Amino acid sequence: MINGTETIKTTVHFWRDYSGPEVDWLLYRNQSLLPIQARWTDNPSLRDAKHLELFMKEYPLATKAFVVCRVPRPQLLAENIEAISWRDLIQKLSNW
């Protein structure tokens, strides 16, 4: 416990499918997975989320995903996949 609150352990992983698709960061906490792709773009597209979509189809513990990039405002790229600014990542993780 820290300051009277329970510490929740989060582990960070990397995922690669045998056929090549990969996810940059895979966070695991409380029986939940959060896949994250990092991209150097301010104009993300569905193409940036294609490996996240594949991962989420294969692993039902992942119910949402992020493409972290330089986008000025959050935008929905696909069902449960959101492009967010790298500046907003900590806030999004605190709500996960």
Image (spheres, rainbow, N blue to C red):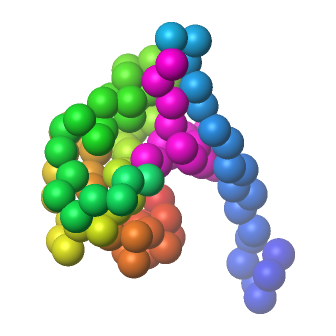
Looking at the picture, tell me which residue is in the foreground, 68 or 64: 68
Residue 31, image x and y in percent? Answer: 62, 39
SS majority, magenta: strand
Residue 34, image x and y in percent? Answer: 50, 45
Residue 29, image x and y in percent? Answer: 64, 49
Please report the bounds of the magenta region as a residue range. Answer: 20-37
Q: Is residue 60 visible?
A: no
Which quadrant of the rendered structure holds the N terminus? bottom right
**Quarter-of-image position of residue 8:** bottom right
Is residue 29 in the magenta section?
yes
Q: Residue at x 45, y 18 (%)?
A: 58
**Up-down relation of residue 8 to residue 88 (above or below):** above
Residue 45, image x and y in percent? Answer: 18, 45
**Quarter-of-image position of residue 83:** bottom left
Q: Residue at x 56, y 47 (%)?
A: 25
Q: Is residue 75 left or right of residue 6?
A: left
Looking at the picture, tell me which residue is in the foreground, 94 or 86: 86
In the rendered image, the residue lying farthest to the top is 19
In the rendered image, the residue lying farthest to the right is 1
Q: Is residue 41 visible?
A: yes
Is residue 57 in the magenta section?
no
